[in-house]
């Protein structure tokens, strides 16, 4: 059974429930198109099978690889960008100790990331650290040709081969890529790297439940079976009914589209737990890349409260009224800490002495919701009992399904990303990549 709960009561002073329920017919049509794979982008629906589609042998193999690498590495570098990066980082940061790198006793390698930028300083600093640490690496690229991870991998591979020798380096590199195409596949086959496959029918931003996400997550010591079980329970719940009143995915998709029609064109995903920062980044990619096309789409933004109440709070309370919030509300923390009593009480906090920190956080959440609703910001609440593998699995599948459904309501293909190519063409032209001569001539004139 899924534990995730959706609450749209704080939307209903902005839109009549009837308007949301009026999406019912459309929702049914789009669910059908998803389930019978007849809608736009239907060759990229493999993610719908992932919660149950991965075999026990594959899970065991991923865990065994993680175990093997753990014995040889203090640091595990995950190279990838976009969908080949954000899912793993979202889950690892959500589940990990906030100060893991500072812990003395470490049962698992510290997972760090590269290939998600082209910063010379970032990469140089990384190589400096890798001089000092025993490390292994996974290079993740579905296409096998993306510039950012290719640059990072070229540097790290050279570093690793110098440090450990070519033979040993081969044992420390894992490639996750297409089953047959692309430069990374060719290199991995030539070098004999351990590889995992990104399925053809799963796009990058829907790939966290493939080895793309599962291997780094297992490497960091988290339970990938529980993550998949969470996703499965959400999948089962969604399959039970297409009724907006019963199906949380249908309700979320209908509500955000109804808000969009009322000119609420920016959705802010709100968390009150800093460990969910990268989950928001993952969500932003999922929705931004899926829906932002053909001149349409809700702009996905994110904030971490209460931190950002001291920066973005003013705008949300009082700025342009084109926004709505979707809050991920965590019912219980994983640890326990109370506010201590202080005899002097100079900070005047004794009125909350003895209370759990989380209770204060929850009151901040409730108070903020009421303030923002009063200020004209509709509020959707998504509750999970705790931040753990199961809840994250539920959230992942919930948001993926809702994104597909929302995209279909919007009338676009939620599984392609034609716009992403534009910057690449210009960058290649500016760098003088062979084959881009005409573009190079044109674009240089514009500089
Ligand atoms: O969602 C997507 O398709 C993109 O964000 C890709 O994941 C990203 O561009 C990386 O692509 P690749 O895995 O081919 O290197």
Image (cartoon, rainbow, N blue to C red):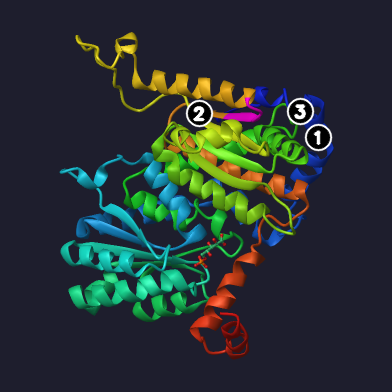
Residue at the image point whose x is 29% and y is 58% from the top = 76
Q: Quadrant of the N terminus?
A: top right
Whichever of callouts 3 and 2 sits on the residue coming sooner in the sequence is: 3
The reply to whether the magenta stretch includes residue 110 is no
Q: Which residue is mark 2?
A: 329
Q: Residues within 10 Å of mark 1 (few under 14, many from 20)?
A: some
The residue to which callout 3 is attached is: 15
- Residue located at (51% from left, 69% from top): 178
Residue 172 in picture, x, y percent from top left? 28, 67
Q: Residue at x 74, y 44 (%)?
A: 31
Examine the rendered structure and indicate whether residue 204 appears above or below residue 239.
below
Which percent across, then down, holds residue 249?
A: 66, 37
- The region drawn magenta spans 375-381
| Location of residue 153 in the rendering, given as x and y in whole percent from the top left corner | 36, 72
User: Which secondary structure, mark 2?
Assistant: strand
Examine the image and state in which quarter residue 347 appears: top left
Circle nearer the viewer, 1 or 3: 3
Quick check: can you spot residue 35?
A: yes
Task: Tell me if 119 is positioned left or right of 309 in this view.
Answer: left
* Precedes in sequence: disc 1 or disc 2: 1
Whole-angstrom CA distance, mark 1 to mark 3, is 16 Å
Label 3, residues with CA under 10 Å away: few <14, some 14-19, many ≥20: some
Front residue of 41/201: it is 41
Q: Can residue 233 be seen by looking at this rendering?
A: no
Q: In this rendering, is residue 359 above or below 118? A: above
Q: Where, by quadrant of the figure, is residue 135 drawn?
A: bottom left
Q: Secondary structure at mark 1?
A: helix
- Sequence-first disc among 1 and 3: 3
In which quadrant of the rendered view does residue 421 lie? bottom right
Which mark is in front, 3 or 2? 3
The residue to which callout 1 is attached is 24
Residue 398 pos. (x, y %) = 59, 39
């Amino acid at each position: 059974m899924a534990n995730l709960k959706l609450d749209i009561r704080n939307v209903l002073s902005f839109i009549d429930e009837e308007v949301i329920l009026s999406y019912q017919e459309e929702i049914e049509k789009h669910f059908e198109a998803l389930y019978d794979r007849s809608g736009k982008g239907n060759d990229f629906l493999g993610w719908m099978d992932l919660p149950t589609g991965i075999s026990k042998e594959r899970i065991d193999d991923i865990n065994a690889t993680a175990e093997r690498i753990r014995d040889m590495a203090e640091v595990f570098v995950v190279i990838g960008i976009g969908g080949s990066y954000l899912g793993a980082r979202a889950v690892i940061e959500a589940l990990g100790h906030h100060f893991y790198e500072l812990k003395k006793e470490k049962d698992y390698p510290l997972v760090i990331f590269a290939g998600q930028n082209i910063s010379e300083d970032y990469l140089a600093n990384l190589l400096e650290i890798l001089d000092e640490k025993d490390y292994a690496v996974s290079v993740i690229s579905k296409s096998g040709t993306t510039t950012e991870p290719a640059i990072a991998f070229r540097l790290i591979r050279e570093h690793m081969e110098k440090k450990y020798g070519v033979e040993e380096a081969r044992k420390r590199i894992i490639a996750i890529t297409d089953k047959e195409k692309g430069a990374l596949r060719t290199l991995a086959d030539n070098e004999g790297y351990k590889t995992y496959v990104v399925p053809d029918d799963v796009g990058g931003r829907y790939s966290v439940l493939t080895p793309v996400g599962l291997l780094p997550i297992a490497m960091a010591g988290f339970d990938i079976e529980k993550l998949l079980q969470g996703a499965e329970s959400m999948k089962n719940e969604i399959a039970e009914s297409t009724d907006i009143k019963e199906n949380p995915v249908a309700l979320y998709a209908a509500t955000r589209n109804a808000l969009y029609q009322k000119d609420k064109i920016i959705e802010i995903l709100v968390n009150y737990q800093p460990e969910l920062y990268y989950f928001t980044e993952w969500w932003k990619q999922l929705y931004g890349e899926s829906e932002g096309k053909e001149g349409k789409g809700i702009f996905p933004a994110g904030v971490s409260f209460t931190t950002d109440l001291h920066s973005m709070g003013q705008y949300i309370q009082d700025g342009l009224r084109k926004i709505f919030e979707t809050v991920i509300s965590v019912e219980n923390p994983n640890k326990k800490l109370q506010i201590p009593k202080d005899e002097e009480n100079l900070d005047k906090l004794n009125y909350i002495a003895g209370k759990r920190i989380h209770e204060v956080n929850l009151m901040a959440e409730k108070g903020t919701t009421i303030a923002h609703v009063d200020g004209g910001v509709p509020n959707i609440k998504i509750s999970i009992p705790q931040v753990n593998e199961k809840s994250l699995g539920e959230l992942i599948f919930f948001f993926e399904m809702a994104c597909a459904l929302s995209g279909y309501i919007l009338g676009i293909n939620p599984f392609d990303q034609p716009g992403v190519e534009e910057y690449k063409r210009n960058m290649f032209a500016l760098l003088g990549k062979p084959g881009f001569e005409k573009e190079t001539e044109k674009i240089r004139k514009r500089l």
